[in-house]
Amino acid sequence: MDWREHLRWVRIGGRWVNVMEMGEGPPLLLVHGHSGCWQNWLENVPYFAERYRVVAPDLPGFGYSELPAEGVSIENYARFLDALCQELEIESAPVVGNSLGGFVGAELCLKFPQRVTRLVLVAAAGLADRYIGLPSGLLRRQSVAAFARAINAYARIPDARLETLVRRPRLRWAALLMVAAHPERLPAPMCAELLRGSGRPAAPEATDALVSYDYRDRLDDIARPTLIVWGDKDRTVPVEGADEYERLIPNARKVILRDTGHVPMVERPARFNQLVGEFLAEEE
C-alpha cells in the first residue's frame, strides 16, 4: 500500500502536523505513544478504515510533526487533539491511545468530554508507579529517558541500513525489546516502520510529562465507556496499571492479552482489532 496518498499536513497552533487519514464514515482517532508515530497503527488502520474515517496524527514533536510552540505536556497534547478535531470538523469520536497516547486520550476526555464518545486505553501511561522496571523518582525519569535515547538512535539510521538491520532477528530483538514481548516474531517491514520516523525532538519533554503529571484523582470524572487493553508481558508500563485504571474509571473494563508486550495493536493485531471493533460497535 502506498501510504503517501493518505498523508496530509494540517496547520495547528502555527505549526505543521503530519496526519494520516483513511476511510469514510464516523471518525475514529488513533493516538501513538512516546517516541512513536502514526505508523504504530499500520496493522490496524486498514481494518478500521472499512467502517470508519480513521485519523492518526504524529503528535507535535514526534514523527514528522513540528514541535509545538507552547511546549510539550499532557495538557497541551490534549488541547492539540481538541484543536485537530476542530480543524478536521470532527465533533466527537472514539479515541484509541497507546502508552503516552492513552494518557493524552484520557486527559482529552477529562478536559474536552464532548470530543470523546468512547475511550480505549492501550497499555496507557499515567498511573504506573514505575517505568521499565525501575522505582519512581529520578531513576524512573532516567529510565524512560534512556529508552527514548535508544529509540532515537535507531530512528537516525539511514533507511537502507535500517531495512538490513531489521531483517536480522537478533537485532530486531535488541531494538524493540522494551516494546514487544517477542520482537523477533514481528515482520521486518513492521519493525522498520516502528523505528523509522520515531524519536523526534519532543522526547525529552514528553519524558518529563510522563513521570510528573498526575491525574489519578480525576479519573472518576470520565463518564465515557472505556476499554483497557494490556499485555501481560509489558516491560514498559506494568500490567498492574490495567487494574488501577479499571478501578478508577467508573465505566471501564479490561482485557489482558497473554504473551504480549507494550504494543498489543502491533503484536496481536487480529485480536486487538476484534476487541476494539466489538467495543466500538456497542455504540452503534
Image: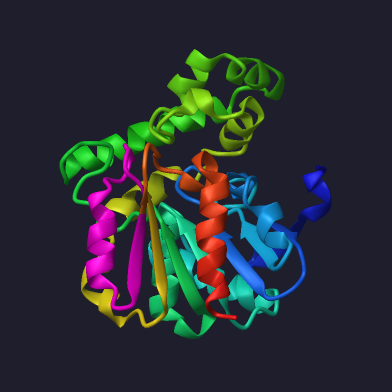
Q: Position of residue 239 (x, y in %)?
A: 27, 48
Task: Indicate how the structure is coloured in the image.
Answer: rainbow
Q: Position of residue 142 (x, y in %)?
A: 27, 36
175 or 227, which is in the foreground?
227
The structure residue drawn at horizontal position 66% and vertical position 72%, both measured from the top left corner, is 27
The structure residue drawn at horizontal position 57% and vertical position 60%, both measured from the top left corner, is 30
283 or 219, which is in the foreground?
283
Task: Say left or right for 276 vs 188.
Answer: left
> Considering the image in quadrants, where does the N terminus appear?
top right
* Residue 4 drawn above or below residue 48: above
> Is residue 100 in the magenta section?
no
* Residue 85 drawn above or below residue 146: below
> Is residue 235 in the magenta section?
yes
216 or 79, which is in the foreground?
216
Rendered image quadrant of residue 235: top left
* Residue 262 drawn above or below residue 110: above
Q: Is residue 57 in view from this perspective?
A: yes
Q: Position of residue 238 (x, y in %)?
A: 26, 45
* Residue 110 drawn above or below residue 152: below
Task: Say left or right for 195 vs 259.
Answer: right
Q: Position of residue 149 (x, y in %)?
A: 42, 31
The structure residue drawn at horizontal position 62% and vertical position 58%, both measured from the top left corner, is 57
The structure residue drawn at horizontal position 46% and vertical position 21%, both measured from the top left corner, is 173
Q: Is residue 62 in view from this perspective?
A: no
> Considering the image in quadrants, where does the C terminus appear?
bottom right
282 or 69, which is in the foreground?
282
Q: Which residues are magenta?
A: 231-255
Count of marks overlaid on the render: 0
